[in-house]
Image: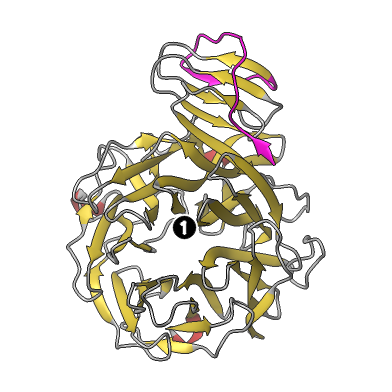
């Protein structure tokens, strides 16, 4: 394990935007500096005056006068010629006590999937990090697995059984499977369990996993994995009662309409009710189970979704869903309803205290409408009611660069603090992995809290080196919330 924070060295830099040397010391100016120090040897960073933004490696040291610090917790190690490198995308994370587990795709293919699924874990609230890649999934795993590609990582923690679980979708030209990789500490991962397998290539997609950790719930210790069955335009949910070792048969969740169904997320309230929020491209819907996933209510529409693609980017109106400490359920997605002629993208936010009535969508005050805001990753503090945060991306008005930002509310979204930029240097679109659906940082993002501190995980990119990208996973460990 390696440590980010120590003292600082001596050097000088006289620019607002600073790229650190390959190794050594750097001192910022008295302006609000943005210092990019990731990707080389060890740096010592002193920021001086102004509100400074730093991106760094775990081996770097950043003084306390560096206000916002994001750490590169993993990078793509693979070299297979048929996928893009270095290209890490689509992260999720979960916290339990002082442990934070992040998971993501590594080595993204243009036409779907990745070389493997990575993980990056801190057991001390983000001060130090370990990283690696899941065993037994693809031919690039160690030991190797049977599948050529894997996608859609999502992570959950089962408090009753004391186990972290990473769900993933592995596939080949002849079959695909939902796999569950298990760990009791977030750093040592077992060979995967097959939760579901199909002989039809990509018959299903976009699984999401959640566990019931409420002391008050009669179903504490049950974990649920919901996914889209494209062939029958339906949602299905699997249930495990033994920490992900075995999974019951798929149970259908009613849906409505003929939208292109995708983006389902399960969430659990303190009384054990399981709700599935799901999205097409025109509406946000919901189905509820009050009996531990055995049956589901008829689906109903929560609200219309107004969505338009962000130019050149792979985006969607998938909801990001979390449950707060008091059982309030929150959801956010990107939507164009507040823009003239639906020309643009904003983050909109709703919540419910009873799962059946919802507030009207409100625009999260992320900034001026000259920019587009998309791909939110919502987090809710499990200890303090009303504390929620959202990590998201914004397209600059030139439509040529991205920034990543975070916004926090202490009153359940009634009011919001000032948005905080997280990236030290703007991301040029040419630095991002390419897919058949557009340039990709991910289809979803995530924020988790540790002892009241939000820790979002995000993909940031720097200038490519030769034919290799430099798109990697970062966690913001200081300066937000």
In the image, residue 256 sits, relative to residue 56, either above or below, namely below
For the residue pair 475 and 159, the one nearer the viewer reads as 159
Placement of the C terminus among the 4 image quadrants:
top left
Looking at the picture, how far across and down is residue 324, in whole percent? 32, 61
Is residue 11 within the magenta segment? yes
Placement of the N terminus among the 4 image quadrants:
top right
Looking at the picture, how far across and down is residue 257, in whole percent? 31, 82
Confirm whether residue 191 shows in the render. yes
For the residue pair 386 and 117, the one nearer the viewer reads as 386
Which residue does the image show at 20% across and 68% down from the upper left? 358
For the residue pair 265 and 334, the one nearer the viewer reads as 265
Locate residue 40 relative to residue 5 in the image: left or right: right
Please name the residue that numbered disc 1 is placed on: 444
Which residue does the image show at 57% across and 20% down from the upper left? 45
How is the rendered protein coloured?
A: secondary structure
For the residue pair 455 and 208, the one nearer the viewer reads as 455
Which residue does the image show at 23% across and 52% down from the upper left? 413
In the image, residue 120 sits, relative to residue 275, either above or below, namely above
The span shown in magenta is 1-23
């Amino acid at each position: 394990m390696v440590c980010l924070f120590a003292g600082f060295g001596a050097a000088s830099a006289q620019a607002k935007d600073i790229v650190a040397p390959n190794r050594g010391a750097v001192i910022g100016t008295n302006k609000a500096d943005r210092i990019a120090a990731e990707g080389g040897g060890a740096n010592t960073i002193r920021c001086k005056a102004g509100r400074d933004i730093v991106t760094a490696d775990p081996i770097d040291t950043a003084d306390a006068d560096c206000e916002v610090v994001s750490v590169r917790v993993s990078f793509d190690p693979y070299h297979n010629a048929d996928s893009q490198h270095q290209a890490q995308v689509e992260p999720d994370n979960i916290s339990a006590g002082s442990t934070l587990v992040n998971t993501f795709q590594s080595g993204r293919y243009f036409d779907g999937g990745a070389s493997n699924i990575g993980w990056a874990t801190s057991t001390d609230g983000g001060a130090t990090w370990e990283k690696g890649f899941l065993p037994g999934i693809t031919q690039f795993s160690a030991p190797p697995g049977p599948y050529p590609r894997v996608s859609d990582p999502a992570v959950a923690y089962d408090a009753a059984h004391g186990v972290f679980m990473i769900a993933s979708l592995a596939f080949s030209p002849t079959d695909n499977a939902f796999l569950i990789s298990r760990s009791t500490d977030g750093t040592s991962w077992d060979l995967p369990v097959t939760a579901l397998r199909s002989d039809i290539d990509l018959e299903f997609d976009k699984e999401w996993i959640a566990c019931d950790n409420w002391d008050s719930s009669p179903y504490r210790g049950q974990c649920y994995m919901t996914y889209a069955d494209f062939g029958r335009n339906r949602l299905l949910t699997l249930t495990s009662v033994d920490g992900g070792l075995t999974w019951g048969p798929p149970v259908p969740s009613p849906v409505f309409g003929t939208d292109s169904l995708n983006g389902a997320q399960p969430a659990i309230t303190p009384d054990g009710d399981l709700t599935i929020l799901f999205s097409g491209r025109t509406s946000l819907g919901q189905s509820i189970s009050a009996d531990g996933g055995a049956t589901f209510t008829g689906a109903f529409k929560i609200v219309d979704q107004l969505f338009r693609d962000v130019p050149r980017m792979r985006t969607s109106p998938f909801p990001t869903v979390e449950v707060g400490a008091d059982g309030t359920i929150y959801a956010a997605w990107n939507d164009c309803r507040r823009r003239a002629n639906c020309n643009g993208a904003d983050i909109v936010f709703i919540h419910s205290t009873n799962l059946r009535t919802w507030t009207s969508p409100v625009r999260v005050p992320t900034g001026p409408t000259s920019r587009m805001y998309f791909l939110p990753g919502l987090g809710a503090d499990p200890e303090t009611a009303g504390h929620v945060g959202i990590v998201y991306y914004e397209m600059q008005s030139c439509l040529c660069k991205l920034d990543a930002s975070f916004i926090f509310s202490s009153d359940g979204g009634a009011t919001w603090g000032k948005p905080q930029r997280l990236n030290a240097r703007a991301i040029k679109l040419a630095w991002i992995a390419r897919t058949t659906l557009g340039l990709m940082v991910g289809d979803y993002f995530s924020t988790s809290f540790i002892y009241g501190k939000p820790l979002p995980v995000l993909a940031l990119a720097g200038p490519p080196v030769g034919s290799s990208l430099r798109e990697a996973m970062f966690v913001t460990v200081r300066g937000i919330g």
